[in-house]
Image (cartoon, rainbow, N blue to C red):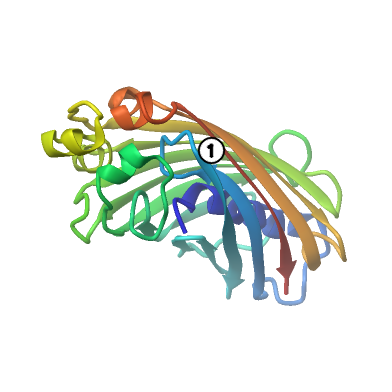
Amino acid sequence: MPYIRTSSLILGSTLAAFTTLPAHAQDAPADPYRDTVTVGVGVAALPDYEGSIDYRITPAPAAIGTIKGYGFALAGNQLSVDLIKNAPGAVWDVQAGPIAQLNLNRSALGSIDDRRIRALGKLGVAVELGGYVGLGKTGVLTSPYDTLSVTLGYRHDVSGVHDSGIWSPGITYVTPLSRKAAIGVFASADIVERGYAQTYYSVSAAQSAASGLPVYTARGGLKNWTFGAIGSYSLTGDLLHGIKVVAGGTYGRMEGDIARSPLVAIAGSRNQWLGTIGLAYTF
């Protein structure tokens, strides 16, 4: 499947927010660190590659869980674990842990419609490892149960595909509307190092001859920013139990040297839309 990270993370963050948030609004369980797992699958509309103007439909799997007070999130091709065990019902939520991601952008695992981009050649699957830190607060604006969280992540390619790093700051706000429904908004950005920019957005002389795109050397910096909305509604039980429908969408914009690359400025678009809808089940 092609570039699924962002759409899967929409589904993943929807599951995460709407699995854990409403717990504060209900009676505390006998075991405050009770295990809970939510799995979901959806369909997503997303670009062929980061910066593409062509879109396709692809599966978007996700899973969120808490085991003995420690959280994990599997969102498509990214796995993260929160190693900070916070007290149940705490107002502040300190987050930190590892991240592992497979970067499938322009890899052999995805198909690309634009013949000019295909002529640039397939790239390998980059294995990106790193970590993140974050801080969340419950009871911010609309109720004692809404949450605001900020995070900062860093990943570095250890497979030699682009051999560089990506910084990813983000902010998320989620509020329950009832025991069955909740909504949220979020914003994020990706700041890439030179190796990433050159690997995915530069065009060499040989690639220019093959594709017809002009020669271009990309530098690192702000790659893109994204703003999105998420929502969930329980079809059975409530947001903590049973089946729920989850949906999300984002608008993003490519920036800087990445936006000026022929892959975006000529063959693609700075404007990037993503959307997903699916079902999830909480055990």
Total of numbered circles in the picture? 1
Counting other residues with Cα less than 10 Å from the Cα at mark 1, is it few (<14), some (14-19), or many (20 or more)?
some
Residue 90 sits above or below residue 208 on the image: below
Q: Quadrant of residue 129?
A: bottom left
Q: Nearer the viewer, residue 63 or 144?
A: 63
Is 187 placed above or below 160 here?
Answer: above
Frontmost residue, 136 versus 20: 20
In the picture, which quadrant includes the C terminus?
bottom right
The residue sitting at 28% across, 30% down in the picture is 221
Residue for point 43% across, 39% down: 169
Label 1 element class: strand
Residue that carries the numbered disc 1 in the rendered image: 171
* Residue 64 spot, x, y in % from top left: 60, 65
Give the side of residue 30 with respect to residue 199, left or right: right
Q: Whole-percent x and y of residue 92?
A: 59, 49
- Along the viewing direction, whichever of 62 and 167 lies nearer the viewer: 62
As shown in the figure, which amino acid type bears the numbered disc 1?
Answer: Ile
Q: Is residue 53 left or right of residue 89?
A: left
Q: Give x and y (percent) for residue 138.
A: 67, 46
Instruction: Depth check: give the residue in front, 171 or 161.
Output: 161
Residue 241 on image: x %, y %? 79, 68
Q: Residue at image x 34%, y 59%?
A: 108
Q: Residue at x 60, y 68 (%)?
A: 65
